[in-house]
Structures are given as C-alpha cells and as structure tokens.
Image (cartoon, grey):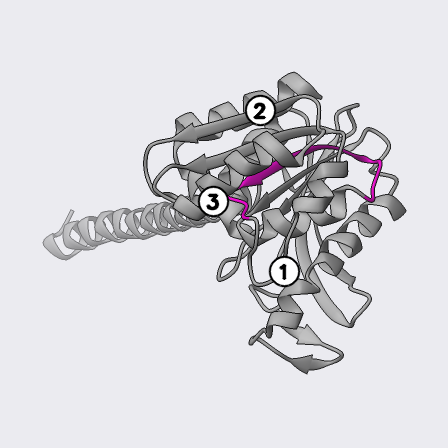
Amino acid sequence: MTVPEAKAVVDKMFEVTEKDTRSTAFFISVAALVLVIALIAAGAYLLLTKNQGEQGPTAPKDYMPITFQTSDGWELHGDLYTTTGNKPYLLLVHGLNEDRSAYKTFAKDMHVRGYGVLAYDSRGFGESKVRNGAYQDKLTGHDVQNSTRDIVAALDSLEVRNMTGNGIVLVGASVGANTAAIVAVNYTEVKELVLLSPSVDYQAVRPFQSLKKFTGGLLLVAYQGDSLAYMSCQEFQTNATLAKPVNFFYKDGNLHGTSALVQSDMRSKIEGWIMDNI
C-alpha cells in the first residue's frame, strides 16, 4: 500500500468516526432538550398545584368563586367551599378595613373538618366595590348600618344552592359581629353565632335587642385590653342573651376581631366550640 493510499484509508476512518461523533452528539442534544422540557413542565405543574392550594382550603373541585347582589345594589364577591357531608355551612363576616382573606386559615381548618364555608368581601372592601354599576370604596355610616343586607344576600345565595339544610354557623368580627347578631335572630337556619369583639354600639349598629331574642348557641370572644369589646361581651353575657349554650373566651391582650384567629390557641378553642355544639 502506498503512502497516499494509506493516508486515504486513515482519512476515511477519521471521517466515519467524526460522523458517528456528530450523530451521537445530536442524539445527546435531543435527549438533553427533552429532559429540560420535562423538568420545566414538572416545575410548572408543581407551581400551579401550589398556587391552587394557596387559593383555598381544599382541591379546586370543592371551591367556586361566587358573586351575589344585595337588595340595595352592591355586587359582592366571595369564596365558597362546598361540602357533601351533613355538617353546616359557616358564613364568615369580616370587620371594617379588611376583607375575606382575614379568615383564610380559619376557613381552611373548618373545611378540612367537613364544614362548608362562605367567606365574602363586605360592601366597600376587597373585590366588593361596585354599587349599581359604579365604583365605591368609601362608606357612609348609613352604608355600614345597611351592611346587614350583605349577610342577608349571602344567606340567600346559600339557600338557593340548597346549602342551609344542616344549619348555618354565623361568624362575625368587630362591626361584622354586630351586624351578624342583628341578622341571626331572623333566620332559624342560624344555629350558632360566634362574635369576635362585638360591641354594644359600632357606628350605630346595636345588637343588644337582637341578642335578647336569639336562642341558638352563642360564643363571645374578646381580649381584656380591647376594653370596649371586653366590657360589651360581659354585658351581653349577663343581660342580653337567651342563647343556649352560651360560652365566652376572654384572654389577656388587646387583639381585636379576626386578629384573634391569628393565635393558634384561640383559633383552636373557637373551632372546638363550634364542633362541640353543632
């Protein structure tokens, strides 16, 4: 074999090796790309699942956003977590300058225990800032007093969905506690009333007379440093209620309204009382 012939053979050998190398590199690149795409898809799925879990207490099949109208024109938005069991629904009413997210952990706890939950944004707060087609986020005293209509509309929205048959636990905070007490006495479906930091008078919303007539289970919650709520609860406890059973949780500190639910021990007490009494 001549030198040129030998050189040609060697060159051919390297040509084949180079082709094989390019082919192998190509397949490796494709495999790597497929792996990257799979990892991205898996990460996106996990992120979506996490975000869905943060939206509400349970799987999306148990959750629906709802919108309902009050008799005086407010469009209210809420989160409804459904149940197929025989436990009642909880209707959660927040106080001024907050929205339904104040009940997020409490709602999750109770829904996991088999309760249905409706938490909504009261008029002028959160997503509920449209009245008769116009934006409104400033409330007058009259608007606050009429927020009893928000609770009535929420109860009606549960009733039309046949979700009141096992009773309602109505939970209110601050002025939402006062409005809840006023509405509860007119609805036999309301079996329990949980009042977080109620008062004898919040912006002319006065529940005293209503609490005299309410005969369901009543729980009063107040911190001693929140003096108006604490003294009001003592007055309600002593003079203003015929409710049975009646209970109260008083604690040192100055937390107000839904802030009580941030403390796990108080939240657990409230949850336990609800479960023990209905």
Q: Earlier in the sequence, mark 1 or mark 2?
A: 1
- Say whether residue 109 is magenta: no
Q: Is 50 left, or right, of 154 in this rendering?
A: left
User: Of the residues shown, which amino acid type is indicated by label 3?
Assistant: Ala
Q: Position of residue 114 (x, y in %)?
A: 67, 25
Q: Which label was assigned to residue 229?
A: 3
CA–CA distance between discs 1 and 3?
21 Å
Q: Which residues are magenta?
A: 186-199
Q: Is 152 left, or right, of 63 in this rendering?
A: right
Q: Is 160 left, or right, of 68 in this rendering?
A: right
Q: Which label was assigned to residue 122?
A: 1
User: In the image shown, does 36 or 265 lie closer to the viewer?
Assistant: 265
Image point (70%, 63%), residue name: 76
Q: Which residue is mark 2?
A: 247
**Local SS, label 1:** loop
User: Of the residues shown, which amino acid type is indicated by label 2?
Assistant: Asn
